[in-house]
Image (cartoon, helix red, strand yellow):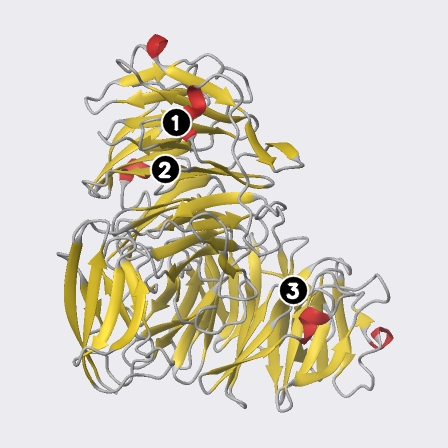
């Protein structure tokens, strides 16, 4: 979709299937195709047309040449001949609280969706529901995890036993026509899956972590040494068993155990989620840590991962001038959260774990970054229990905690957050587990605690911090408000500093009304280009137009922005929304993330809503926005959500003070390009006039920050003809002008 780019992770692969042309890997938020000829990799996400995120099953049927993708919501996508057709019927069933598709089984002209409430039979020729099978009455519906055929019968694995019915039986929609298999050792255990090998039907008894086989007359326990089984399936050469840290291929000629395939020198344990033996006899493994893993003959294993971050679980997001830094969270083999991170440079993602950087070993997740704008390869990271990390050239070069600095710890946990750098690259941080909750590390390397009065209560747990243009430090105290301080002399001497803790309050006054509101749940803060302070709360936005007066005596009030809808009424923007993030783009516009309603873009003062993106009207992965970061050079806006990362190409960049770098792209604009051109390298508010070679005015606009957009149409909305066009750029702010030539081909 125009303007959007997905950055979901393709590392944690959970499913693999095969089509005649491709091997297909699936993660929770996207799929990718590996061509059998040349191994070319292509991806599909919401941006490329998938209906949503939360993939829970995939299957391919060769009879109709359809790839089916099932979702946690009950939604279903069908990909045929490169086109995606959505089948949302299940999502509309209001009487079913859980509609998750656990497995898709295809036979003949039908697909059978194993769902959290039963089985839905889909006619693939008509693309409609043919039947729905239930395995209980009323509120006693069973969750179905797998379906297979064996001995002329249907076999269904549920969370309360296995059910069987003759394939030719009438009215399978009546649950009374299905028989619970009471001959099983524990008839109402949870069974996850089926597999067939050597004339036997196998099933996985998840309640008792064991495999059982059926020979047509009795159930028997098999391969009792196997533990921590995830599920089983039928392979081309026998039974495939997926366990916690191993795969077993069981066939007539014996058993092959695979317990290790990581890259060279990696100590990370494998985490297989699915596997198959392809039509050419090669083993393909969906691994949660190593991507789509491929064994070909005796050449070892290849790990195929499309260009993407290492994880969709994001704990921090920050943008440099051109790079994007994403802190991610992965789980160790013992289930403990570990720090990992990803960096996007020149469109390429680099992913770092303890395997690539030993400095990350045993480090708790990163909670924030502070980037040195003058030296982008130097940055800091705060952690949720492991202190403070310093990076150089994308490697940890120093680690500070309670043992080698003035940072404090509680219960062996050194929590650091709310990082920021001032204009002299001094680092400022909060340390909630320390005696001094706020501190600094100077450029000379000295740690300086700042024990300000009023920051000693248990409620003083800073969430974020910024340093304003006037050198006031603003610290978010989520449960209390804001803490502001300004260094007046030496950093070590807080006695002469200005500081104040304030509640976040707004005041509205007109000729008849005076309204004062107090806010809680303080969550976000940003200074805009006009040096106004924007604060996010659990009930909307508060703006301080005079933040430098915070140290004056008396109450300190902000105001709630209200849209200009022509009615003259006071209607504070987002007053019912829980704000999670605020970011200011090059045009001084405000990007505001919320906990439940996606993201909003407002004009500089909040008077007009320009865009509202949510998971229904856009490719946005989720309505829960965790943070927003804007790349000032490209204008690309990155949104981290609880489902992963996605970006939108904005029409605003940071403005320049000269036109030395001003240019237009693409140039020439060819007839196949319908998106128009972008003029970059301008100053904010640059007046842009476009004329033909004879001087006739074709179009005019002004830049948002350093960028202006022209759709190659004249003032009547008609695309201009082939020719040379002149782009006149003038900035009254800096008294500079420039003319750029553009060739348009129509």
Label 1, label 2: how far apart the Cα atoms are: 9 Å
Label 2, label 3: how far apart the Cα atoms are: 48 Å
Tell me: residue 110, above or below residue 13.
below
Tell me: residue 115, above or below residue 149.
above
Q: Disc 2 marks which residue?
A: 531
Indicate the position of residue 58 as horizontal and vertical percent values: 53, 72
Q: Secondary structure at mark 2?
A: loop
Q: At 62% from the left edge and 74% from the top edge, which residue is drawn? A: 200
* Quarter of the picture holding the C terminus: bottom left
Q: Is residue 645 left or right of residue 555?
A: left
Indicate the position of residue 299 as horizontal and vertical percent values: 26, 68
Q: Disc 3 marks which residue?
A: 100
Q: Is residue 52 visible?
A: yes
**How many neighbours does mark 1 have within 10 angstroms: few (below 14), some (14-19), or many (20 or more)?**
some
Tell me: residue 668, above or below residue 589.
below
Residue 430 image label: none
Q: Is residue 451 left or right of residue 561?
A: left
**Quadrant location of residue 693?**
bottom left
**How many neighbours does mark 3 have within 10 angstroms: few (below 14), some (14-19), or many (20 or more)?**
many
Pointer 1 and pointer 2: residues touching (CB < 8 Å)? yes
Q: Secondary structure at mark 3?
A: loop
1 or 3: mark nearer the eye:
1
Q: Secondary structure at mark 1?
A: helix
Indicate the position of residue 464 as horizontal and vertical percent values: 43, 33
2 or 3: mark nearer the eye:
2
Residue 548 image label: 1
* Quarter of the picture holding the N terminus: bottom left
| Nearest to N terminus: mark 1 or mark 3 | 3
Q: Is residue 312 left or right of residue 530?
A: right
């Amino acid at each position: 979709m125009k303007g959007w780019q997905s950055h979901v992770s393709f590392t944690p692969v959970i499913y693999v299937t095969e089509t005649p042309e491709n091997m297909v890997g699936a993660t929770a938020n996207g799929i990718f195709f590996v061509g059998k000829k040349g191994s070319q990799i292509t991806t599909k996400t919401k941006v490329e047309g998938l209906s949503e995120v939360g993939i829970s099953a995939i299957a391919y049927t060769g009879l109709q040449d359809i790839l089916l993708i099932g979702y946690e919501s009950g939604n279903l996508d069908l990909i045929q001949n490169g086109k995606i057709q959505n089948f949302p019927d299940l999502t509309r069933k209001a009487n079913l609280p859980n509609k998750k598709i656990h497995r898709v089984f295809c036979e003949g002209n039908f697909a059978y969706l194993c769902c959290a409430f039963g089985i839905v039979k889909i006619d693939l020729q008509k693309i409609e529901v043919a039947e729905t099978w239930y395995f209980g009455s009323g509120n006693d519906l069973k969750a179905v995890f797998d379906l297979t055929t064996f001995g002329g019968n249907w076999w269904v694995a549920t969370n309360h036993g296995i059910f069987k019915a003759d394939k030719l039986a009438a009215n399978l929609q009546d649950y009374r026509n299905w028989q619970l298999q009471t001959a099983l050792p524990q008839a109402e255990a949870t069974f996850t899956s089926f597999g067939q090998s050597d004339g036997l039907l196998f099933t996985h008894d998840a309640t008792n972590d064991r495999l059982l086989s059926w020979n047509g007359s009795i159930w028997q326990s098999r391969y009792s040494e196997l533990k921590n089984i995830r599920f089983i399936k039928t392979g081309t050469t026998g039974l495939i068993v997926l366990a916690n840290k191993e795969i077993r291929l069981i066939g007539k000629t014996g058993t092959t155990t695979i317990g290790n395939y990581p890259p060279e020198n990696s100590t990370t344990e494998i985490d297989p989620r699915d596997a198959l033996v392809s039509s050419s006899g090669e083993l393909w493994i969906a691994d949660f840590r190593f991507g789509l893993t491929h064994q070909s003959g005796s050449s070892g294993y290849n790990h195929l991962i499309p260009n993407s971050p290492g994880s969709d679980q994001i704990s921090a997001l920050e943008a440099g001038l051109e790079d994007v830094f994403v802190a991610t969270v992965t789980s160790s083999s013992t289930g403990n959260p570990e720090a990992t991170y990803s960096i996007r440079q020149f469109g390429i993602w680099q992913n770092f774990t303890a395997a690539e950087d030993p400095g990350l070993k045993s480090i708790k997740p990163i909670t924030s970054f502070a980037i040195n704008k003058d030296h982008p390869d130097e940055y800091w990271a705060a952690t949720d229990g492991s202190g403070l990390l310093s990076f150089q050239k994308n490697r940890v070069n120093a680690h500070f905690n309670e043992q080698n600095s003035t940072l404090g710890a509680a219960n062996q946990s050194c929590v650091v957050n709310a990082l920021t750098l001032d204009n002299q690259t001094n680092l400022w941080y909060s340390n909630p587990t320390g005696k001094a909750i706020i501190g600094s590390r100077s450029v000379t390397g000295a740690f300086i605690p700042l024990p300000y009065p009023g920051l000693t209560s248990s409620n003083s747990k800073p969430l974020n911090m910024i340093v304003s243009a006037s050198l006031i430090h603003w610290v978010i105290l989520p449960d209390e408000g804001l803490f502001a301080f300004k260094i007046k002399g030496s950093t070590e001497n807080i006695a002469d500093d200005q500081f104040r803790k304030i509640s976040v309050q707004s005041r509205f006054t007109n000729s008849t009304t005076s309204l004062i509101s107090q806010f809680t749940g303080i969550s976000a803060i940003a200074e805009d280009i006009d040096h106004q302070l924007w604060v996010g709360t659990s009930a909307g936005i508060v703006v301080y137009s005079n933040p430098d007066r915070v140290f004056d005596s008396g109450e300190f009030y902000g105001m709630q922005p209200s849209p200009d809808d022509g009615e003259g009424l006071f209607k504070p923007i987002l007053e019912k929304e829980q704000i999670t993030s605020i970011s200011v783009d090059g045009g001084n516009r405000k990007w505001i993330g919320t906990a439940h309603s996606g993201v909003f873009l407002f004009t500089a003062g909040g008077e007009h809503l320009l865009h509202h993106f949510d998971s229904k009207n856009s490719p946005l992965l989720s309505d829960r926005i965790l943070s927003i970061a804007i790349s000032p050079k490209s204008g690309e806006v990155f949104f981290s959500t609880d489902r992963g990362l996605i970006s939108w190409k904005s029409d605003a960049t940071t403005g320049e003070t000269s036109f030395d770098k001003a240019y237009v792209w693409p140039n020439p604009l060819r007839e196949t390009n319908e998106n128009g051109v972008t003029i970059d390298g301008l100053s904010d508010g640059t007046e842009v006039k476009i004329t033909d070679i004879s001087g006739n005015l074709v179009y005019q606009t002004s830049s948002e920050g350093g960028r202006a957009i022209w759709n190659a149409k004249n003032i009547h909305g008609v695309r201009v003809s082939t020719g040379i066009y002149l782009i006149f750029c003038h900035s009254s702010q800096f008294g500079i002008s420039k003319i750029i030539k553009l060739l348009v081909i129509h």
